[in-house]
Amino acid sequence: MEESAATNNQQLNSIIPKQTPKFSPSLIATFVLLVVIGAVAGFFLGKSLAKPRPAPVPPIAKITPTPTPILPSLTPPINISLTPTPIVKTTPTIQKWKMWKGIGVSFKYPYSWKANEPVSTIVKPKSGGFYQQSFSSGENMSLGLFTKIRLQKNDGKYVDLEEEFNLPNKYQISIGGKVGLRADYADLYNPEVYNLVAETLLDDATIIGIHLIVQPANATSIEKAKSIFNQILSTFKFLD
């Protein structure tokens, strides 16, 4: 039985032909192309992975401003009133002063002062000048109005007022709208006497001046005398 089965199998194998698998050229080309693409992709992927990546930038912290605290208002409000400093008047008002007129000028002087008897004529001695009018304060001051002839040079021209006004600490001022000179100084021979002198031109040939004398002189009396002298000069006018 076994021998007959084997014989039958051999007969069947001889009848059925053996088939060998076949591969087409297009299939082989596609396979090669896929291999090449995979190799190229793997090369670039490996290169990108090998490239160092930049370190991540930390996020910027957001700064939130601290709100300014609002202080509570004072209730009720505090009202502060300042007491004005009183103004001390050291001299009388100029409006109440007396007016003096003469020899082409006018000015005011303190009401309590006394005008002495004036000189009736203007005398022009060779020595220079003299007082035309004097005033007494009744205290430690006296005022004098004087005139003097201007000095002349050899050529007949007059000496400049600044050169002739040979007094210490002199400086320029305005007297009745004219240029004048003033000097405030202590007496060289008597330290208790303080002088305030101002001069200007009365005309081309004549100088007119005011001289205030303080005696005895101290810091308080000198400051008071300067204030009175300034006010007298402020009222000085030349008459037409």
Image: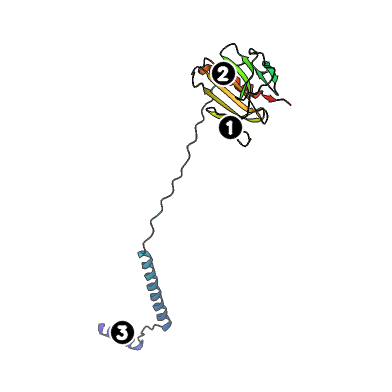
Nearer mark to the viewer, of 1 and 3: 1
Measure the alpha-carbon separation of dots 1 and 2. Answer: 22 Å
> Residue 109: x, y in percent?
65, 17
- Depth check: 4 or 179 in front? 179
Of label 3 and label 2, which has the lower sequence position? 3
Amino acid under disc 1: Glu
Name the residue that disc number 1 marks: 162
Image spot of residue 129 (x, y percent): 62, 23
Q: Is mark 1 on a helix, strand or loop?
A: helix
Element type where label 3 sits in the image? helix
Q: Is residue 31 left or right of residue 231?
A: left
Q: Please rate how many residues cluster around mark 2, counting C-alpha atoms within 10 Å: few if below 14, some from 14 to 19, many from 20.
A: many
How many residues crowd mark 1 within 10 Å: few (<14), some (14–19), many (20+)?
A: some
Residue 12 drawn above or below residue 150: below
Give the total of numbered labels.
3
Instruction: Give coordinates of residue 1: x percent, y percent.
Output: 26, 83
Three-letter amino acid code of the residue under disc 2: Ile
Q: Which one is closest to the eye, mark 3 or mark 2?
A: 2
Residue in the foreground of this view, choosing between 175 and 150: 150
Please state, as top left, top right, bottom left or bottom right, where the C terminus lies in the image. top right
Q: In this view, does 202 lie above or below 224?
A: below
CB contact under 8 Å: marks 1 and 3: no
Residue type at numbered disc 3: Asn
Is tag 1's residue or tag 3's residue first in the polypeptide sequence?
3
Q: Residue 213 carries which label?
A: 2
